[in-house]
């Protein structure tokens, strides 16, 4: 079966919702999301959103902090767009009902690692992403012309003569594949943390958008740069629940299994060093002490403040018999955010006509080799709006259709990533394409992923394996250590050869 709309947005996180609002002024918008409307990485973002609205802060300082964190690979134009336009979009969100925390009526700001000022806004203590999604969903529902299709898993992009014309997706009621055509498509599918055995990301973060775009011929960039959050809850029987960067920003310290602070041995900024530095320090400390975790310690902070500042974290940890105001919290790193993605310019354009991308699925170059904490929600707002505006202005005047080739419209879909493939890929990626990488492990991973890819796979399983291979191939090709990419066999930064972006595109013969 087929149908049509004016614009398709794939994904319902911050970037997708903000793009939809922009697109609605130019026609009908259909938002496809493979789970419930609010299920995305955005909803799980705890720490906050970075923006210059504080009297003692400056746009130039936010710019420089972002550039410094990116380890030489940030696109300067993209960073300038982010920090200069960010305040406008935050004030716009406040006008549309987003309720950020306040102190005596004024916006309350906190500080996180690698920020030179207190510029992090938060909502309900540690539920910033959830509040932004709530406000954006309310905004979209008040905007005429926006339709949601929840539990509709997108499978492929439809391409004809080098232009994206629509998508195929699995209809939730019948589990049959349908084609949906549009004048333009905006990808906002989020991240790919589920490639790894241990991740802070929800189950939906399987990198579908990056893989679909690559399969359709779009250029992917910087896929080797995967950020591992240093402090996820490190209990064997618990999910890797994120323990916000803000916990260290508010004074939390890290202790090893011997009860001693260790971060100053790895970096003079100690607990406030960038995420990649802290994650590696924890990794090496765990190796040195033969321990499965280190500890985050907030016991010296005021208990009432901790409970009010981190209410969601407090309640969740209590489920596992940990009182964060009284107990040491076991933590270890987990896959968290991918800096790479579908290559775009600062207006959301990909290399494929008719296809735009924004948010974590995209690579604008704003994060470089290592994302600065709390820049991701701001990126979603700013570049989601830009992608939506650009797609609306450049869209085809009419909806064009294509002849189905590599999809069988109307067939029952085996649409889930099969459990065996998922488990095998996650083990390979964690063991050999993780926090610390080296040549033999990366080659071993590629051999294992090649073997998995040769099995009979449905579309989404193929996408999942292919995305893992892109990350491993990019990591193998970058023979240096930069930002979140660390090679134990090439531990130095090599600007002479590798101060450049890694670009990957599917061969034109379809292999």
Image (cartoon, rainbow, N blue to C red):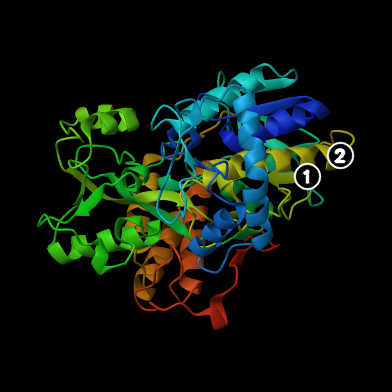
Give neighbour class at mark 2: few <14, some 14-19, many 20+ (Cα, 10 Å): some
Is residue 10 in sight in this rendering? no
Look at mark 1 in the image and give the residue it sits on.
354
Is tag 1's residue or tag 2's residue first in the polypeptide sequence?
1
Q: Is 159 or 262 nearer to us in this picture? A: 262
- Which quadrant is the N terminus positioned in? top right
Residue 29 position, x and y percent, is 73, 27
Q: Is 276 or 391 nearer to us in this picture? A: 276
Give neighbour class at mark 1: few <14, some 14-19, many 20+ (Cα, 10 Å): many
Q: Is 476 or 456 nearer to us in this picture? A: 476
State the SS at label 1. loop
CA distance for labels 1 and 2: 8 Å
Residue 125 position, x and y percent, is 38, 30
Is residue 271 in sight in this rendering? yes
Residue at the image position 44 percent from the left and 37 percent from the top: 45
- Which quadrant is the C terminus positioned in? bottom right
The vertical placement of 209 against 257, above or below, is above
Residue at the image position 21 percent from the left and 36 percent from the top: 324
The vertical placement of 308 against 459, above or below, is above
State the SS at label 2. loop
Tag on residue 396? 2
Residue at the image position 57 percent from the left and 20 percent from the top: 174
């Amino acid at each position: 079966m087929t149908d049509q709309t004016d614009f398709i947005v794939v994904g319902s996180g911050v970037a997708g919702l903000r793009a939809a609002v922009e697109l609605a002024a130019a026609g009908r918008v259909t938002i496809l999301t493979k789970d419930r409307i609010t299920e995305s990485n955005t909803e799980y973002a705890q720490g906050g959103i970075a923006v210059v609205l504080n009297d003692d802060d400056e746009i130039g300082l936010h710019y420089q902090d972002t550039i410094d964190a990116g380890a030489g690979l940030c696109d300067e134009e993209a960073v300038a767009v982010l920090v200069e336009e960010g305040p406008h979009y935050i004030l716009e969100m406040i006008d549309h009902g987003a309720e950020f925390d306040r102190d005596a009526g004024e916006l309350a700001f906190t500080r996180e690692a690698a920020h030179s000022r207190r510029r992090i806004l938060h909502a309900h203590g540690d539920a910033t992403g959830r509040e932004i999604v709530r406000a954006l969903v309310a905004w979209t529902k008040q905007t005429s012309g926006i339709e949601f299709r929840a539990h509709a898993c997108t499978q492929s992009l439809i391409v004809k003569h080098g232009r994206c014309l629509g998508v195929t997706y699995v209809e939730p009621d019948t589990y049959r594949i349908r084609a949906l055509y549009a004048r333009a498509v905006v990808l906002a599918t989020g991240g790919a943390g589920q490639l790894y055995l241990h991740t802070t990301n929800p189950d939906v973060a399987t990198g579908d958008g990056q893989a679909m775009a690559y399969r359709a011929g779009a250029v992917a960039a910087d896929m080797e740069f995967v950020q591992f959050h240093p402090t996820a809850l490190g209990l064997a029987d618990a999910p890797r629940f994120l323990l916000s960067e803000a916990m260290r920003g508010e004074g939390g310290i890290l202790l090893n299994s011997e009860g001693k602070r260790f971060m100053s041995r790895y970096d003079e900024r100690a607990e406030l060093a960038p995420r990649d530095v802290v994650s590696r320090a924890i990794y090496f400390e765990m190796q040195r002490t033969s321990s499965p975790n280190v500890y985050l310690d907030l016991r010296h902070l005021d208990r009432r403040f901790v409970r009010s500042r981190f209410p969601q974290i407090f309640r969740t940890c209590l489920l596992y018999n940990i009182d964060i105001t009284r107990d040491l919290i076991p933590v270890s790193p987990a896959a968290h955010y991918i800096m790479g993605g579908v290559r775009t310019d600062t207006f959301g354009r990909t290399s494929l006509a008719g296809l735009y991308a924004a948010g974590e699925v995209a690579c604008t170059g704003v994060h470089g080799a290592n994302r600065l904490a709390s820049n991701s929600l701001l990126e979603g707002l700013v570049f989601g709006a830009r992608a939506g505006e650009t797609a609306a202005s450049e869209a085809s005047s009419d909806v064009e259709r294509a002849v189905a080739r590599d999809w069988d419209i109307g067939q029952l879909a085996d649409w889930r990533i099969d459990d065996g493939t998922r488990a095998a890929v996650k083990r390979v990626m964690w063991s050999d394409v993780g926090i610390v990488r080296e040549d033999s492990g990366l080659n071993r991973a590629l051999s294992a992923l090649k073997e998995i890819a040769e099995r009979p796979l449905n579309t989404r399983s193929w996408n999942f394996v292919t995305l893992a291979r892109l990350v491993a191939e990019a990591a193998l090709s970058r023979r240096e250590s930069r930002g979140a990419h660390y090679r134990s066999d090439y531990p130095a930064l090599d600007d002479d050869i590798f101060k450049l972006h890694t670009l990957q595109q599917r061969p034109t013969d379809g292999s």
